[in-house]
Image: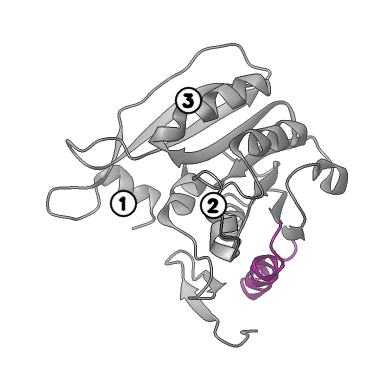
Amino acid sequence: MLKEGERLDDLEYKGLKIIQHPEGYCFTSDSVLISNLAKVKRTDRVADIGTGSGIIAILVAAKFTPKEVVGVEIQERLADMASRSVEYNGLSDRVKIVCAPAQGVEKIIGNNFDVVISNPPYEKASEEKNEKTVAKTEIMLTVEETVGAASALLRYGGLFYTVNKARRLTDVLCAMRNAKIEPKKLYLIQPKKGKEIDVFIVEGKKGAKPSLLVPEPITVYEEDNFYGEIARRLYNK
């Protein structure tokens, strides 16, 4: 199951494990957070754009047991690791990993998805092209392209979830409205009380009317460096 240099990491949830390579791209806690904030029903079809190691697809499948989850990843090595992680966790009947670009992927996997989730590249394009920079910068996938792909995949009334750095908030919200996905709920994430908002997660609905709800910020750590109450639940601690 493991190839040279790879390791098997414990997700600390339902015995799930994931294959990663320490010298390549590894998932972050943002993927765990968005996986737990998404609203997914058992009858839903879910797409994960830029699935990377498959972390979101695997957690969503295990937590919500939806009808189908399709993880889309352009990088062959990451898609291969994600596929093997799906198989290792016994989720092959529900989760499929497709190695393809997000742009135009609806022609490959179809549309009318109920939920689309994405932890996309956060940073502007880097000059250096490798596994990490493709995953973290907009070399091959921009915010606008991520949202456009989500809109093409979603049915009318379907839900879209994406996470990004606070400095990209305007870019994401504008892209969503332009793609006819209306922002409906904005989660603000701060590392500690009193600290600036670092990350946000937004829930959008395709074809919805304007109306945005902003709950109280989610604080990851308390002053004693332990997880806050909401963060403990969302990170499965």
Label 2: few (<14), some or many (≥20) within 10 Å?
Answer: few
- Residue found at x 52% / y 22%: 184
Q: Secondary structure at mark 1?
A: helix
- Residue found at x 58% / y 52%: 60
Which residue lies most toward the bottom here?
A: 4
Residue holding disc 1: 232
Q: Secondary structure at mark 3?
A: helix
**Quadrant location of residue 194?**
top left
Question: Of label 3 and label 1, which has the lower sequence position?
Answer: 3
Which marked residue is nearer to the observer: mark 1 or mark 2? 2
- Residue found at x 53% / y 65%: 25
Which residue lies most toward the left here?
A: 224
- Whether 77 is among the magenta residues is yes
Give residue 43's position: percent from left, percent from top: 71, 42
Question: Of label 1 and label 2, which has the lower sequence position?
Answer: 2
| Quadrant in the picture for the N terminus | bottom right
| On screen, residue 84 above or below 5 | above
**Quadrant location of residue 42?**
top right
Which marked residue is nearer to the observer: mark 3 or mark 1? 3
Q: Secondary structure at mark 2?
A: loop
Question: Of label 3 and label 2, which has the lower sequence position?
Answer: 2
The amino acid type found where label 3 is placed reads Thr
User: Label 3, label 2: how many angstroms apart (C-alpha)?
Assistant: 21 Å
- Residue found at x 49% / y 71%: 15
User: Label 1, label 2: how many angstroms apart (C-alpha)?
Assistant: 34 Å
Whether residue 214 is visible here, answered yes or no, is yes
The amino acid type found where label 1 is placed reads Arg
Residue 170 - label: 3
Magenta part of the protein: which range?
Answer: 74-93
Give residue 123's position: percent from left, percent from top: 49, 45
The total number of labels drawn is 3
